[in-house]
Amino acid sequence: MFTYREKLYMLKTLKQNKAKRLFGLRKLPPEHQALVDKLEQMVRNEQVNKAHL
């Protein structure tokens, strides 16, 4: 299990990687976007849960 800070770091890193690739010739695998979506959902869930605790 990852900590909240680790999830934020991974999400930031993946988004930066995507931004660099937009101008490149190679496309990212579909798993990349799926992982970004999952991490965003996990971060949102932690933010909501933290507010309710």
Image: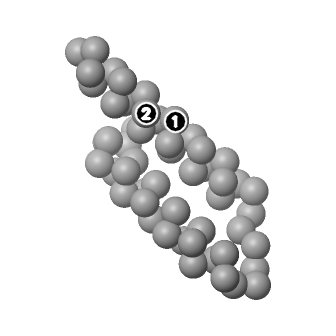
Q: In the rendered view, would you say 52 is above or below 50?
A: above
Please state the horizontal and vertical placement of residue 21, each as a whole percent of the image.
64, 77
- Using the image, determine if residue 14 lies above or below residue 48: below
Which residue position holds label 1? 41
Q: Quadrant of residue 27?
A: bottom right
User: Residue 52: horizontal and vertical position, in percent?
Assistant: 28, 15
Q: CA distance from mark 1 to mark 2?
A: 5 Å
Position of the C terminus by quadrant = top left
In this view, the residue in front, 19 or 9, is 19
Residue indicated by mark 2: 44
Give the residue displayed 41% in from the left and 38% down from the top: 43
Instruction: From the viewer's perspective, tell me whether residue 19 is left or right of residue 29.
Output: left
**Amino acid identity at mark 1:** Gln
In contact (CB < 8 Å): disc 1 and disc 2: yes
Judged from this view, the residue extending furthest toward the left is 53
Picture layout, residue 46 above or below residue 34: above
In this rendering, the answer to whether 50 lies above or below 33 is above
- Residue type highlighted by circle 2: Arg
Residue 3: where, in percent of width, then height?
A: 31, 42
Helix, strand or loop under label 1: helix
Residue in view at x 52 percent, y 62 percent: 14
Say whether residue 40 is left or right of residue 50.
right
Question: Quarter of the image containing the N terminus?
Answer: top left
Q: Residue at x 26, y 21 (%)?
A: 51
Element under disc 2: helix
Residue at the top extreme of this rendering: 52
